[in-house]
Amino acid sequence: MNMQTNTDFTLAIEELTVSFDGFKAVDDLNFYLDKNELHVIIGPNGAGKTTVLDLICGKTKATSGSIKFLNNELIGLSEHAIVRSGVGRKFQTPSIYENLTVLENLEVSYPHSRGVFGSLLFKRNKTVLDKIHEIAHEIMLEQMLDTEAGLLSHGQKQWLEIGMLLIQDPQLMMLDEPVAGMSVKEREQTAILLNKISKGRSVLVIEHDMDFVASIAHKVTVLHQGKILATGNMDKVQNDPKVIEVYLGH
Ligand code: ADP
Ligand code: MG
């Protein structure tokens, strides 16, 4: 087969399949992501969206196919090695440290920090603090640096987790339903945040809220039964008869 070879892709997924006891949750998927691209995957429940992210981050092992990140094969690497190579993933439930302050949460996520116990014992240096302030500003939590994370609103907790990924400066950032449970105002602020984040890296988002998708997506891919039903800009995808039939029509 004539494979597409372009070294400029951040992510190049080819012929990716995962089969769970014979059921193909992802079925011969081909998917490409450019630098500075914010791509949203939509589709009905059970379409395989989360599984695609699980495959990219190494949580689920592929049955066959290839996932190249900056031209390096990810399949076979450990989850830890994939994170270190520059892939950040935000899960649906935020994994923040509720008993630490916003500042401390960002600090323990700083690359080469000594982890949650070690880093708190070391004197904070200016480079780290400057970076923490820069990220806190970006995630709209600059005024909350000394607040315990457990006291933040649901939306602010999501932003903090995004900040904890951003401080590691991933080249690919993946977010699974980032605005679930957020207020309208928080959704709008998150859209602005994601637009900023996509400058200089690639962002892959799974989302259901179509207004939110329309406000952020450069490109949309509709997944259905582990296969791509349609891909392109929002307008094209929204008006695709197949998409209306299996997804948007309901
Ligand atoms: P989506 O995120 O699009 O709602 P998922 O990727 O979570 O869908 O799931 C796709 C399908 O794969 C579902 O039928 C789900 O039950 C199945 N699935 C996902 N992960 C596993 C697994 N680890 N073992 C068995 N089946 C799984
Ligand atoms: Mg899912």
Image (spheres, grey):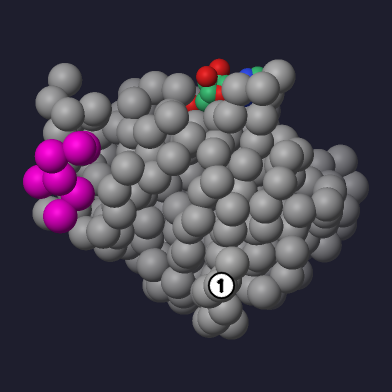
Query: Looking at the image, which is closer to me, 179 or 131?
Result: 179
Region in magenta = 236-243
Instruction: Establish if 183 lies above or below 31.
Output: above
Quarter of the picture holding the N terminus: bottom right
Instruction: Establish if 73 lies above or below 213.
Output: below
Residue annotated with mark 1 = 2
Can residue 56 be seen here? The reply is: yes
**Crowdedness near tag 1: few (<14), some (14–19) or many (≥20) residues, C-alpha within 10 Å:** few
Q: Secondary structure at mark 1?
A: loop
Query: Looking at the image, which is closer to me, 80 or 157?
Result: 80
Rendered residue at 38%/39% (across/down): 223
Amino acid carrying label 1: it is: Asn
Give the side of residue 74 with respect to residue 247, left or right.
right
Give the side of residue 85 with respect to residue 205, left or right.
right
Q: Residue furthest bottom?
A: 7
In the rendering, at what x and y percent does residue 17 appear?
62, 42
Query: Looking at the image, which is closer to me, 181 or 185?
Result: 181
Quarter of the picture holding the C terminus: top left
Give the side of residue 147 with respect to residue 236, left or right.
right
Instruction: Establish if 138 lies above or below 20.
Output: below
Give the side of residue 238 with respect to residue 49, left or right.
left
In reply to whether residue 186 is colored magenta, the answer given is no
Rendered residue at 89%/47% (across/down): 118
